Image (spheres, helix red, strand yellow):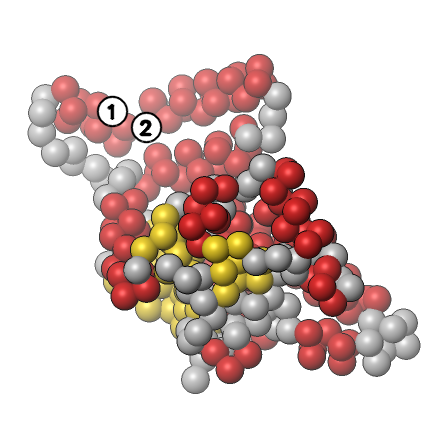
Amino acid sequence: MAILERNDTGAIAHLKMNMPERLNALSDEMLAALQTELDALRDDKSIRAVILSGAGKAFCAGHDLKQMTAGRQAEDGGKAYFQDLFNRCARVMMSIQSLPQPVIAQVQGIATAAGCQLVATCDLAVAAEGTRFGVNGVNIGLFCSTPMVALSRNIPRKQAFEMLTTGDFISAERAAELGLINRVVPEMLLKQEALALAEQLATKLGTAVKIGKKAFYQQIQMPLDQAYAYTGEVMAENMLHRDTEEGISAFIEKRPPNWTQ
């Protein structure tokens, strides 16, 4: 049984973390499996949207603490292993945001520490009622510094700092209020809602979404004047695409577009 399952439905890829007995922890093996699939998706032009979920009662409980403890047995006390682990995790997170396709987190149960980081990293997120989110490493003496990077880019800084320093969980409803997730639905409708969102995204022009996703993450880090200059160039290039011309013509002529991609 694969620890990460991929099933494609039309233009939608569904990645399911499949280690429910370990709450889908981001073990060395899980990180490697995620990286392999993300690398494959990058060049898969048949896929227009991705759903990421976790099997069992939890979406993801963060890093595998037993594996991390075993890493301490090295002569350096685990320093090299820990640095490599967090670098590999960061690469997975950055790979999600650099994918040309939008990635939707389908969340249930709990999303804690690096699991909460994973939700914050995905482009969109749908959660079941009753889901809890936390960056609670501080409760065991390990401040969630790497999860903080994604979290603090999703929600207001004071709320992020409160979560990081208290270790408290927040509800799905509160996560939606803060902007960590897009919507909350009854658990029985979770898969249906995530799929409906993915299907909606998959109807859009893939090249336009790819251009827009890259520009979104680039411009958000820039000062206002640079952001406008950069996105102006991006839009000008986008306008030159054949399918964009067709999309505009179709809108004017009140007909469906005949896109090639």
For image coordinates 52% across by 74% down, the residue present is 23
Return the x and y of residue 134 as percentages of the image width and height. 58, 58
Q: Secondary structure at mark 1?
A: helix
Residue 58 seen in the figure: yes
| Crowding near the residue tagged with mark 1, few <14, some 14–19, many ≥20 C-alpha atoms within 10 Å | some
Q: Amino acid at mark 2?
A: His
> Residue 261 at what x, y percent from top left?
27, 42
What residue lies at 16% left-to-right and 36% top-to-bottom?
Answer: 258
Q: Are marks 2 and 1 in contact (CB under 8 Å)?
A: yes
The number of callouts visible is: 2
Q: Residue reaching furthest bottom?
A: 1
Expressed as whole percent of the image width and height from the top left, the position of residue 236 reads: 40, 19
Q: Foreground residue, 109 or 92?
A: 109
* Residue 241, disc: 2
- Residue with the mark numbered 1: 245
What residue lies at 48% left-to-right and 49% top-to-bottom? 175
Label 2 neighbour load within 10 Å: few <14, some 14-19, many 20+: few
- Residue at image x 68%, y 54%? 166
Residue 168 location (% of width, % of height): 62, 57
At mark 2, the secondary structure is loop
Q: Is residue 23 left or right of residue 64?
A: left
Amino acid carrying mark 1 in the image: Glu
Pick out the residue farthest to the right: 75
Quadrant in the picture for residue 72: bottom right
Q: Is residue 65 left or right of residue 106?
A: right
Separation of marks 2 and 1 at Cα, in angstroms: 6 Å
Question: Is residue 96 visible from the viewing direction of this image?
Answer: no
Quadrant of residue 156 within the rendered picture: top right
In the rendered view, tell whether residue 78 sits above or below residue 251.
below
In the rendered structure, find residue 127 and report the number of the disc placed on it.
none
Where the N terminus falls, by quadrant? bottom left
